[in-house]
Image: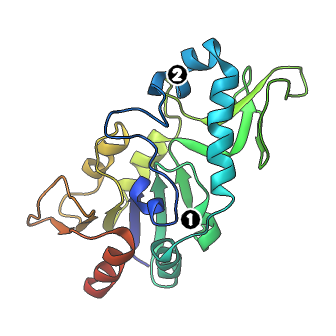
Amino acid sequence: MKHLVVLTGAGMSAESGIKTFRGADGLWEGHDVMQVASPEGFEADPELVLEFYNQRRRQLLEVAPNKAHLELANLEKHFKITIITQNIDDLHERAGSTNVIHLHGELLKVRSTKNEALVFDWKKDLNLGDLDKNGNQLRPHIVWFGEAVPLIDKAVEICATADKLLIIGTSLQVYPAASLMHYVPENTPTFFIDPTPSISSSKKVTVIAESATEGINTFISVL
């Protein structure tokens, strides 16, 4: 089977009701990003950071995968598919996709502040005083600004094996994820779905200027 590599971002989940919570002013729900998504912010005000992600987690548990998630899962009947997502939600998995790489972590997991290998599934609020077995505070299993992206090397290796590349719901502005499209083999057919695309169609790239749920139909029709 041909290997279809899919890069997804916030626009993929927006139609499920997941807020793309960074506003045009750069604030996340009224907070400076460094307050709620950095090690320094967590050290300065851990309760604020934990509640910020508690709100995200509660919201995630109330929404469902949309048509774009479901159609991607259905394509596994015809392609070997690897999804590399910047999203921290589990909507790809809930839709039925079986091979998902979360570059920026997972909202429904937490980990020890002292041992990154101690990771736990978590669907309730996370509070100060929630500790690992060694008495260390737990934190969201999220890659914060200033932290390394542990799975980026694996993502690069996956892109190097792509027969086709689909980019959907991401503006390709966040690095290192935005660099991944450059690691696919030369002349790999690339499809870019975004209602306000940041790139133009070319010999190699087909731009589909539609939302995720609309664009996935167009993509499937030209496969």
N-terminal of the two: label 1 or label 2? Answer: 2
Residue at (41, 40) in percent of width and height = 22
Give the amino acid type for the residue marked by disc 1 in the picture: His
Query: How many numbered discs sit on the rendered protein?
Result: 2
Q: Position of residue 94 (x, y in %)?
A: 64, 68
Determine which residue is flagged by label 2: 35
Above or below, 23 against 41 in this view is: below
Residue at (21, 68) in percent of width and height = 209
In the rendered image, the residue lying farthest to the bottom is 221
Above or below, 75 against 171 in this view is: below
Determine which residue is flagged by label 1: 92
Mark yes or no: residue 9 visible. no
Q: Position of residue 51 (x, y in %)?
A: 68, 33
Looking at the image, residue 110 sits to the left or right of residue 30; the answer is: right
Residue at (61, 46) in percent of width and height = 56
Q: Quadrant of the N terminus?
A: bottom left
Dot label at residue 13? none
* SS at circle 2: helix
In the rendered image, the residue lying farthest to the front is 30
Binning the other alpha carbons within 10 Å of mark 2 as few (below 14), some (14 to 19) or many (20 upward) gives: many
Above or below, 25 against 210 in this view is: above
Looking at the image, residue 165 sits to the left or right of residue 121; the answer is: left
Q: Position of residue 24 (x, y in %)?
A: 31, 40
Q: Quadrant of the C terminus?
A: bottom left
